Image (cartoon, grey):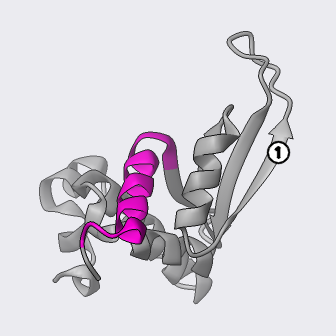
Amino acid sequence: MNPTSKPDLEIAWAAGFYEGEGSISACGGHHLILSLGQVDIEPLGRFATAMPSGAISGPKKQNSALSRKPFYQFQANGEGALNCIRAMWPNLSTRRREQALRAFVRWMFRTVGYRAPRKTAWEERKHGVREYHPALKT
């Protein structure tokens, strides 16, 4: 596909939006969750349109002193979260790729009942997530 085609541009835009507003985690090790929250539903709608799976929920009431505006959230779980990351992968920064890999490894090992050994934050910075998990080396 042409690198400047509309789908590729939308995925690149979505990756940039995710870089600034999104997160991925393995909640309890058993649930892989990709999420983004906003008070404006328009960019979330654009993000959801560019992604292969996931849904928008809200509006939810905020009880924050900083904002009382309604809050919307995009969320993709499990394989859906993995498919979203896969779509954005070429456009993600190293930091976001490593965050996704750490979440995926925790999710993958906990799903099959294996707990990966933990490293200190210093060891992860020194060696990186790819050194820590040989299966992820390219």
Is 6 or 101 nearer to us in this picture?
6
Q: Which residues are magenta?
A: 3-22
Point out residue 69 in the picture as x, y percentages from the top left corner.
77, 22
Q: Is residue 96 visible?
A: yes
Q: Tell me the quarter of the image containing the C terminus.
A: bottom left
* Residue appearing at x 79%, y 52% in the figure: 57
Residue 116 is left or right of residue 2, and the answer is right
| Residue at numbered disc 1 | 58
Q: Eyeballing the image, is 17 above or below 114?
A: above
Q: Tell me the quarter of the image containing the N terminus.
A: bottom left
Residue 125 is left or right of residue 119, and the answer is left
* Element type where label 1 sits in the image: strand
* Residue appearing at x 72%, y 16% in the figure: 67
Dot 1, how many residues are within 10 Å of its Cα: few (below 14), some (14-19), or many (20+)? some
Q: Amino acid at mark 1?
A: Gly
* Residue appearing at x 54%, y 59% in the figure: 25
Point out residue 129 in the picture as x, y percentages from the top left corner.
26, 65
Residue 138 is left or right of residue 50, and the answer is left
